[in-house]
Every structure is written in structure tokens, then in C-alpha cells.
Image (cartoon, rainbow, N blue to C red):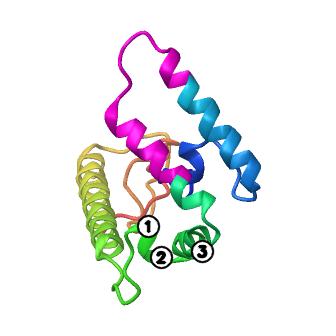
């Protein structure tokens, strides 16, 4: 596999540096394996196998094919293609999610502080300053200033 796509080298199960005799042996081996099969071989697979052998056994066609593998169009990417807007959409969704999370946390904290200030402070302790929640209990919310 080359960039997630099957190449003619993959069809013949070869490395890109394979020599001519290796190409011929691989073609003959795969063709013999298909002939041994119980059912009739897939015609598309036979045609692809034959195409791979024809292209890779001819030095000129093989060089042209190897050049095409280095081209971005092989991967379906045009040279002048603009980047997709996928990353912008993901960034916008992340900002909206964080804004919503902030709103929910601030809203729950302010309602929590309001409910705490309505309760009377215990008589044995001095009241807390007005910049923090009125509850004098040692909780995680006690140190958070109310708005």
C-alpha cells in the first residue's frame, strides 16, 4: 500500500525495487495460484494482475508509473487545491463548546452562591467577607468569589 492506495507493486506482492526477473516470477506464481483455485478467478483480479505485469515489466512504462506515484494527484490531491474548511469548523465548534461550558459553570456557581448566602452563618464562627460566598463551611466553593 502506498499512501493507503493499492499500487501495481501490491498487486504482484513486490517491493518497488524489484528486478525484472522477480516481476516475472511473481506474475507466474500469482497466476498459478489463481489457476489452482476451486472456483473461477475474479476477472477483475486477473485483468489487474495482467496490467500490473505489463506496466512493471516494460522499463519506460514502469518509470512513468513510478513518477506518477510521487505525484500528489495519485492520492486524489490537486496541486492547487485549497485547504478544506474542516479545521475552521472544528475550531468554531470547540469555541462554542467552551463558551457553553463556561456559561453553565458560571451560572451554577452564582446560583450556588445565592443559595448559600440565604442560609444563616453558624453562630460559633465569624461571617466571611462579602467578596466570597457567605457559607463558612470548608468546601471547594467557599474560596470562589461570587459575582
- Tell me how far mark 3 sits from mark 1, CA to CA: 22 Å
- 19 with respect to 121 (left or right): right
Q: Residue at x 60, y 64 (%)?
A: 58
Location of mark 2 (residue): 72
Location of mark 3 (residue): 60
How many dots with numbers? 3
Badge 1 density bin: few <14, some 14–19, many ≥20, Cα 10 Å: some
Q: Residue at x 31, y 76 (%)?
A: 84
Percent of width and height locating residue 23: 67, 48
Residue at the extreme bottom? 80
Residue 63, by quadrant, is bottom right
Q: Please provide the residue range marked out in magenta.
A: 33-53
Disc ID at residue 13: none
Verify CB contact (< 8 Å) between mark 2 and mark 1.
yes
Residue 38, by quadrant, is top left
Please say whether residue 56 is visible from this viewpoint: yes
Query: Looking at this view, is 95 or 42 the one in front?
Result: 42
Location of mark 1 (residue): 75
Q: Residue 36: within the magenta?
A: yes
Percent of width and height locating residue 32: 57, 25
- Tell me how far mark 2 sits from mark 1, CA to CA: 6 Å
Query: Looking at this view, is 91 or 106 the one in front?
Result: 91
Percent of width and height locating residue 6: 49, 50
Observer-side mark, 3 or 2, equals: 3
Main secondary structure along the magenta-highlighted residues: helix
Badge 2 density bin: few <14, some 14–19, many ≥20, Cα 10 Å: few
Amino acid at each position: 500500500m502506498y499512501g493507503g492506495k493499492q499500487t501495481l507493486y501490491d498487486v504482484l506482492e513486490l517491493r518497488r525495487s524489484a528486478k525484472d526477473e522477480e516481476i516475472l516470477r511473481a506474475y507466474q506464481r500469482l497466476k498459478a495460484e489463481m489457476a489452482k483455485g476451486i472456483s473461477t478467478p475474479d476477472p477483475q483480479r486477473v485483468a489487474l494482475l495482467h496490467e500490473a505485469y505489463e506496466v512493471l515489466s516494460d522499463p519506460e512504462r514502469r518509470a512513468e508509473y513510478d513518477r506518477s506515484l510521487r505525484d500528489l494527484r495519485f492520492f486524489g490531491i490537486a496541486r492547487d487545491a485549497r485547504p478544506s474548511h474542516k479545521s475552521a469548523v472544528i475550531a468554531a465548534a470547540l469555541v462554542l463548546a467552551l463558551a457553553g461550558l463556561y456559561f453553565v459553570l458560571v451560572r451554577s456557581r452564582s446560583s450556588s452562591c445565592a443559595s448559600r448566602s440565604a442560609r444563616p452563618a453558624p453562630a460559633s464562627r465569624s461571617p466571611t467577607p462579602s467578596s466570597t460566598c457567605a457559607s463558612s463551611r470548608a468546601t471547594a466553593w467557599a474560596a470562589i468569589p461570587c459575582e
